[in-house]
Image: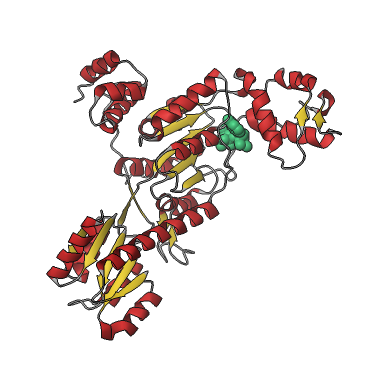
């Protein structure tokens, strides 16, 4: 936790810094409001402790500026005894809490933690409100699914960017949620965004947020989904549907790991893990020029390919049992001959189609045992194999003013992905090659070889 202490008295900055250091927090000091604002705009702090009485701009004014500039760090005001009414006024103006000097530093630590925890909860609630999705666990005992489960275990604790591909309804989102659920930041939000879902202009403010008045119709300030995701996961769904301008913006975020609200003046670091998904063939899209190659390389650091249900039919009984048990009503079962009928179907719409078929079967079925005649395989408008954006995003030519440096094509695209994955794995394992090889599921010999070829350290 990083805290900015704003006080003109050096010994207060130092002693608070020391005390909070013992509490495991990192602090930086600023001696006046101007310095504090400059620091808040260039670095990210989890909280600010702000003295009410400061030379130059006073605490009240600094608070107003924090608010105005869209800095999201919560603030605790410090005041002297006679200034309590001012402190209360500050609370009304958006300060998170206040302390009257002299105070017990342990009280400060408690208030800081509460404030940061509160902010995190607010973000989770807000993120839930703005994204939808189920919370199913990844079920499956087939070799293919066990392999996927192992992959998820390997990467859950490593912050690599993951691309999940597979046909519609195969469980790409379920897999992404599972990565989040098995990772160390499972208590942070999981934010799902459909990249093809809304008009590109709106998408930008949805993702990055905006300041009041930054465009016509921007009534108040809005926090973007990247920011709301905090240290959790941002799931970029349907990346095959992104317009070119949006691709450029997303690439920047991946390169710089920071965002700026529309109309904002300060950068906000992106701490969330990025997982993306598409039911298209991303390599083909790159070849056809519909997906930027450089963006693809950044997204596809680790790849998970969800197998179609027809290639893992042994999972059908388990999935059917699970789906039927979710109805909450009396427990339905599938008669053996009905199960055979299911097992013989090809499921172009995959698990979502299985869900629909069972849903209808429950309606037809008379005694809670689903019979072959209850199963209507062809009557279902199976989930479309290709998903279509709600409103198709207009494709604009790339703005000439924003050229992006293409990565030099010294090595082939596939090599770049490999090199990137090895570099990240090495970093994640503190340079330990054996561990990095394990993480990537390759032999030690292979990794040593690749390290030499790519000239990695
Ligand atoms: N392994 C699984 N175990 C249990 N339920 C699953 C599993 N995989 C998928 N499902 C269920 O199937 C449905 C489709 O899954 P999901 O939305 O993750 O698919 P998708 O690949 O993202 O599809 P689309 O490309 O259409 O968005 C969901 O209702 C989900 O709960
Ligand atoms: Mg999906």
Q: Is residue 249 above or below residue 346?
A: below
Where on the picture, by quarter, is residue 429? Answer: top left
- Residue 84 placement: quadrant: bottom left
- Which residue reaches farthest left? 10
Which residue is situated farthest in the bottom direction here? 82
In screen coordinates, is 102 left or right of 382?
left
Point out the residue furthest to the right here.
366
Instruction: Residue at 54%, 55% (x, y): give it.
Output: 129
Q: Splitting the image into four quadrants, where does ligand 1 fall?
A: top right
Task: Give above or below for 146 relative to 388.
Answer: above
Q: Position of residue 106 (x, y in %)?
A: 28, 65
Q: Nearer the viewer, residue 415 or 409?
A: 415
Q: Nearer the viewer, residue 254 or 429?
A: 429
Q: Quadrant of the N terminus?
A: bottom left
Q: Quadrant of the C terminus?
A: top left
Q: Is residue 300 visible?
A: no
- The residue at the point 18 percent across, 77 percent down is 56
- Quadrant for residue 53, please give it: bottom left
Number of labels in the image equals 0
212 or 112, nearer to the observer: 112
Q: Residue at x 47, y 67 (%)?
A: 219
Q: Position of residue 332 (x, y in %)?
A: 77, 33
Q: Residue at x 23, y 60 (%)?
A: 20
Where does residue 381 sit, x and y in percent of width and height? 73, 33
Q: How is the image coloured?
A: secondary structure
Q: Nearer the viewer, residue 348 or 428?
A: 428
Position of residue 243 in the picture relative to residue 418 (left or right): right
Residue 374 visible in image: yes
Residue 101, percent across and down?
24, 77
Decide: is 111 above or below 443.
Answer: below
Does residue 366 lie above or below 305 as drawn? below
């Amino acid at each position: 936790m990083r805290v900015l202490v704003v006080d003109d008295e050096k010994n207060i900055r130092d002693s608070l810094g020391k005390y909070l250091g013992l509490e495991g927090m990192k602090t930086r000091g600023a001696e006046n409001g101007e310095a504090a604002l400059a620091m808040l705009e260039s670095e990210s702090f989890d909280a600010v402790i702000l003295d009410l009485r400061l030379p130059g701009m006073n605490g009240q004014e600094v608070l107003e500026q924090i608010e105005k500039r869209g800095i999201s760090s919560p603030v605790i005001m410090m005041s002297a005894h006679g200034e309590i009414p001012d402190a209360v006024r500050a609370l009304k103006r958006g300060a998170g809490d206040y302390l009257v000097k002299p105070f017990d530093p342990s009280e400060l630590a408690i208030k800081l933690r509460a404030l940061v925890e509160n902010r995190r909860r607010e973000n989770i609630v807000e993120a839930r409100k703005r994204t939808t999705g189920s919370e199913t666990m990844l079920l499956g005992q087939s070799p293919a699914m066990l392999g996927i489960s192992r992959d998820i275990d390997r990467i859950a604790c490593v912050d690599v960017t993951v691309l999940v591909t597979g046909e519609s309804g195969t469980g790409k989102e379920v897999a992404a949620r599972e990565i989040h659920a098995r990772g160390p930041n499972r208590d942070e939000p999981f934010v799902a965004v459909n990249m093809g879902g809304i008009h590109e202009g709106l998408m930008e403010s949805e993702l990055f947020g905006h300041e009041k008045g930054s465009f016509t119709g921007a009534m108040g300030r809005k926090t973007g989904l990247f920011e709301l995701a905090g240290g959790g996961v941002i799931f970029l769904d349907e990346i095959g549907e992104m317009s070119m301008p949006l691709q450029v913006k997303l690439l920047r975020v991946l390169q710089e790991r920071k965002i700026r609200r529309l109309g904002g003046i300060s950068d906000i670091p992106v701490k969330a893990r990025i997982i993306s998904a598409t039911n298209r063939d991303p390599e083909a899209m790159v070849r056809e020029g519909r997906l930027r190659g450089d963006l693809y390389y950044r997204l596809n650091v680790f790849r998970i390919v969800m197998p179609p249900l027809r290639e893992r039919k042994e999972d059908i009984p388990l999935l059917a049992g699970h789906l039927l048990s979710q109805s909450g009503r009396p427990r339905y079962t599938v008669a053996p001959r009905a199960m055979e009928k299911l097992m013989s179907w090809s499921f172009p719409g995959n698990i979502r189609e299985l869900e629909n078929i069972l849903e209808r079967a429950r309606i037809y079925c008379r005694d809670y045992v689903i019979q072959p005649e209850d199963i209507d395989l062809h009557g279902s408008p199976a989930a479309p194999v290709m998903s279509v954006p709600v409103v198709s995003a207009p494709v604009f030519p790339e703005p000439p003013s924003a050229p992006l440096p293409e990565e030099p094509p010294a090595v082939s695209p596939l090599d770049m992905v490999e090199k990137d994955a090895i570099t990240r794995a090495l970093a994640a394992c503190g340079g330990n090659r054996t561990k990095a090889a394990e993480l990537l599921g390759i032999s030690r010999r292979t990794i040593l070889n690749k390290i030499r070829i790519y000239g990695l350290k």
